[in-house]
Image (tube, rainbow, N blue to C red):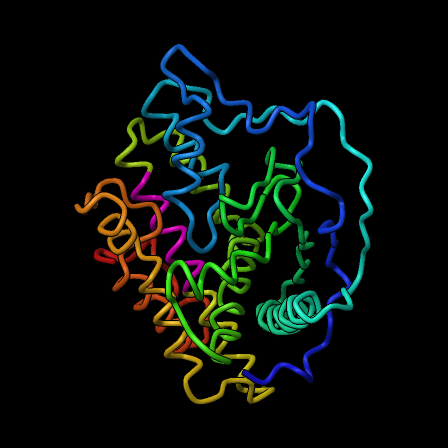
Amino acid sequence: MRWDDFRRSDNVEDDRDSGGGFGGGGGFGLPMGGGGLGIGAMVVLGLVGWALGIDPSILISGAEIATGGRGGQYQQPYEQPTTRRTTGAPKDQMGDFVAAILGNTEDTWSVIFKESGQEYRPPRLRLFAGSLPGGCGLAQAAMGPFYCPTDKRIYIDTSFFNDIRVRFKGCSGKACEFAEAYVLAHEVGHHVQNLLGILPKAQAAQRAAGDKVAANRIQVRVELQADCFGGIWANRSNQKWKSIEPGDVEAALQTAAAIGDDRLQKQSRGTVVPDSFTHGSSAQRQRWFTTGLKEGKVSACNTFAASTL
């Protein structure tokens, strides 16, 4: 992937030196009894959802609907710790890469929004190591990257990129850069959904769904659309910057397949339970990323109108 010429975003907040492991925080505020989710269930959800673009506010909300818990309600940390946060483009190699990809998504989506007479307001991205309190509770590395609609931030522990290579075997070599960019573009896709009003409607539909299976089906459509939006970014960025190199798309598709719900469930439990999917199957993730990459327009990514995914 060619990214040296990408503009570096100033919307990066680097908390990797803050130490992590904060005390006194409330995390997601999940109930410990009365039919709600306990901390163990939260950890399980984090591990099962260790994939591209988990949004804890939606995933845990959907799970709690089925158990009668307080879905979607968060208990903020009681005390925000003092951190050594730096703002702007980081100077290390990984931080520079993240700032470059984020900057390119900003430039790309700004053009797309302008074409429809709208203004793109970019998200902020917070790098952390281990754990970090944020707008959706306590961000932890085990959750994978996620977008928090409450504070309009993307949270990412960059160790996840190593997991793509090693744990999920989603890519290898230099082509992993494009797969990593796909991870970031997927999260930015959730921000685009938020700006377009799609995400709030999906969350409301999940709360009204009444059962976990129905809520999960909505969640799958949210995630597949974010995959498709990631494909749009790749299409439009490549048109202007010629950023895609041979093997890049294959690496992204391999990563999408590696983190499909069916693949992860087969590896973890030996069986596949489609009603519990939250991100979509390997084939679905590949299909919708490819759709965005091929079409390059938002109208092609209406996963909510698709009769079959």
Residue 115 lies left or right of residue 224; in this view the side is right
Along the line of sight, the residue nearer the viewer: 95 or 19: 19
Residue 151 lies left or right of residue 140; in this view the side is right
Q: In this view, does 285 lie above or below 25?
A: below
The picture places residue 183, in percent across and down from the top left corner, at: 50, 62
Q: Which residue is drawn at 75% across and 50% down?
A: 17
**Residue 279 highlighted magenta (yes or no):** no
Q: Residue at x 67, y 59 (%)?
A: 122
Mark count: 0
- Main secondary structure found in the magenta portion: helix
Quarter of the image for residue 102 reads bottom right
Residue sitting farthest toward the top: 34
Q: Which residue is drawn at 43% across and 21% down?
A: 38
**Residue 221 highlighted magenta (yes or no):** yes
Residue sitting farthest toward the left: 271
Along the line of sight, the residue nearer the viewer: 100 or 228: 100
The picture places residue 123, in percent across and down from the top left corner, at: 66, 55
What's drawn in magenta, residue-wise?
A: 216-227
Q: Which residue is drawn at 42% across and 26% down?
A: 40
